[in-house]
Amino acid sequence: MAKTPRILILNGPNLNLLGEREPAVYGRDRLSDIEKACARRAKSLGLAIDFRQSNHEGELIDWVQAARKSHAAIVINPAGYSHSSVSLMDALIAFERPVIEVHLSNIFRREPFRHHSYVSRVALGVISGLGKQGYLAALDALAGILKTEVEA
Ligand code: CA2
């Protein structure tokens, strides 16, 4: 039987505050609600997930580097690091497997400094503005993409 592909889902700084503040921008779901929904969807798609959040750039980079040995793909909401971190982008380049970038809000409807993301340069795809559904859409897409890779 084929091994269940593991997907690393990473969340950047301040996303631990979800549901507590700024509901008009980020919605009412807590990060734990998003994690539960991802776990349910992943199971139905035949995927396994590791769902993590960090407020520290280096910790996110360490996780991306380690994932080269353990994970088939990454879903990442880099939060503020989207707009600032060349180092996170470099780590994602070295991952050399599919990366999908997710944003809860539509960054293009917001301040100009949010319109540019370093991570978008290296992501296979970007989903922005769909809230929790964006994470689920990323898992749906990866199920198809990874299946295609196995069949290829
Ligand atoms: O829309 C997104 O998902 C963002 O990645 C969220 C980041 C922001 O810097 C990006 O431009 C877009 C901010 C995450 C902060 O989350 C909070 C949640 C609740 C209260 C305060 C911050």
Image (spheres, grey):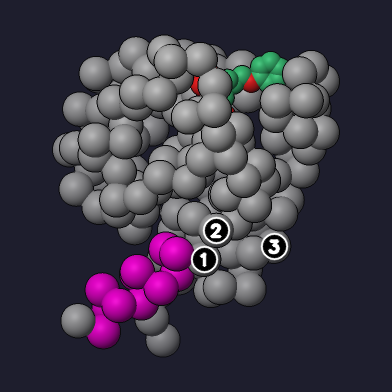
- Name the residue: 19% across, 48% down: 96
Q: Does 139 sit left or right of 34 as displayed?
A: left
**Which quarter of the figure is the N terminus placed in?**
bottom left
Instruction: Specify few, some or many for label 3: CA neighbours under 10 Å numbering under 14, 14-19, or 20 or more.
Output: some
Q: Which residues are magenta?
A: 141-151
Observer-nearest of 97 and 121? 121
Task: In the rendered structure, find residue 28 and report the number of the disc placed on it.
Answer: none
Residue 15 % position (x, y): 63, 24
- Name the residue: 54% across, 28% down: 109
At numbered mark 1, what does the secondary structure look like: helix, strand or loop?
A: helix
Q: Is mark 2 within 8 Å of ligand 1?
A: no
Q: Is mark 3 within 8 Å of ligand 1?
A: no
In this picture, is 99 found above or below 59? below
At numbered mark 2, what does the secondary structure look like: helix, strand or loop?
A: helix
Residue assigned mark 1: 140
- Name the residue: 40% across, 45% down: 126
Q: Does 148 sit left or right of 39 as displayed?
A: left
Give whichever of discs 1 and 3 has the lower sequence position.
3
Task: In the rendered structure, find residue 40 and report the number of the disc placed on it.
Answer: 3
Residue assigned mark 2: 137
Find out whether residue 109 is within the magenta segment. Answer: no
Instruction: Specify few, some or many for label 2: CA neighbours under 10 Å numbering under 14, 14-19, or 20 or more.
Output: some
Residue type at mark 3: give it: Arg
**Which quarter of the figure is the C terminus placed in?**
bottom left
Q: Nearer the viewer, mark 2 or mark 3?
A: 2
Residue type at mark 1: give it: Asp
Q: Quadrant of ligand 1?
A: top right
Can residue 26 be spotted in the picture?
yes
What kind of secondary structure does the magenta stretch mostly adopt? Answer: helix
Residue 49 % position (x, y): 54, 54
- Name the residue: 24% across, 18% down: 86
At numbered mark 3, what does the secondary structure look like: helix, strand or loop?
A: helix
